[in-house]
Structure formats: structure tokens, C-alpha cells
Amino acid sequence: MALLPILIAPDPRLKVTAEAVERVDAEVRALMDNMLESMHAANGIGLAAPQVGVAKRVIVVDTAREDEAPRPLRMANPEIVWASEETECSEEGCLSLPDHFADVTRPARVRVRYIDHENEIRELEADGILSKCVQHEMDHLDGVLFVDHISSLKRNIILRKLVKSKRVEAAG
């Protein structure tokens, strides 16, 4: 397995619409495994393929806490087939927007259909942190960042800070 570099906003590759996966084969499984390893190494709970520069509809999620056994989910072509009318607002962060957080409102529960790492069609009903995480990662597949759900003022402040920090890092 290999650690993949995670793109930092504003990077135009984070704004692309990812393409569907025809089938989960050895190449896609390797991508999923590398994404999980990269996500865990960065202390994240979710990662989408566009965040590692791959424009494919693939996400990985593991919401297990440090003291719990890992519960990795590998999803290709995830789609929400049902969402609750009830919503929840909670703080979100993102590996592509390090050290920045904002409150985002999303459906409290969702049912997601996807292809798993064995190329089997599955459905998952999720609530709580898993629901938020899956929805957040699925947004990435359509070029949407969590900051796209907040006011333009807050979004612009966060993006300006990220641009500045990239310049400082590049200057060495």
C-alpha cells in the first residue's frame, strides 16, 4: 500500500465532477486501500478519490474512535437513495481544508447504495457521524467542499487563509 498526497484547497482538481467506476477491480481496490491508509495516516474519518487527485466516484470512511476496532467502508459510485426530512447541524472539517471548521446542516439520516470492494451492490442506512461523513465525502465527488455550504464571507476567509499558508509553505 502507499500513502497518497492529499490535495489542499484551493486546488482546481477538488472542483471536478468525478466519473463513475465501471466495476471494482484490482486497480480500484488498490486505490480504496491506499486511500484508507492515507486517511488514517492523516487522522481523518473520510476521504474521496478527488482529494488524492483521482477523478473517480470512490470514497472511503471509517468513523471508529481510537479505542474502537476499525470499521472501514469502501464505496464506489455511492448514491443517496433516501434522505430524512429531519436535518442536523454540526461542525465539519476536511483533510483538504486543514485546521478549518464550520457548521453544516445536512439530512440526519440517509440510505446509500454503492458498490463495495468485492464489486457487490450494497445499501447502507446511516445516521449520526456516519451519515454526515458519507454525505461530506459524496459531495467531493461532485466538486463540492463543505465550505460551499456556508456563507460566502466565511468561505472566502477560509480559502484566503489556505492560499496564504500555501504561499508561506512554498517560500520555505
Image: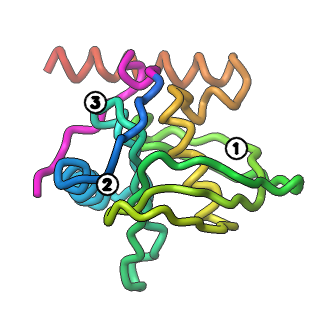
In the image, 79: left or right of 38? right
Q: Are marks 3 and 1 in contact (CB under 8 Å)?
A: no
Tell which residue pokes out farthest to the right in this image. 85
State which quadrant residue 165 falls in.
top left
At which x and y percent is residue 137?
Answer: 51, 45
Q: Which residue is mark 2?
A: 39
Please identify, in this view, whether the residue under mark 2 or under mark 3 is nearer the observer: 3
Q: Is residue 129 above or below residue 27?
A: below
Of the numbered discs 2 and 3, the one sitting upstream in the chain is 2
Q: Residues within 10 Å of mark 2 (few under 14, many from 20)?
A: many
Label 2 and label 3: CA atoms lie apart by 14 Å
Residue 82: x and y in percent read: 75, 54
- Pointer 2 with pointer 3, Cβ within 8 A: no
Q: Secondary structure at mark 2?
A: helix
Residue annotated with mark 1: 103
How far across and how far down the image is residue 79, in percent?
Answer: 59, 47
Q: Amino acid at mark 3?
A: Gly
Residue segment shown in magenta: 1-16
What number is the disc on residue 53? Answer: 3
Q: CA distance from mark 3 to mark 1?
A: 26 Å
Question: Helix, strand, or loop for circle 3?
Answer: loop
Relative to 39, 110 lies left or right: right
Please indicate whether residue 88 sits to the left or right of residue 66 in the image: right
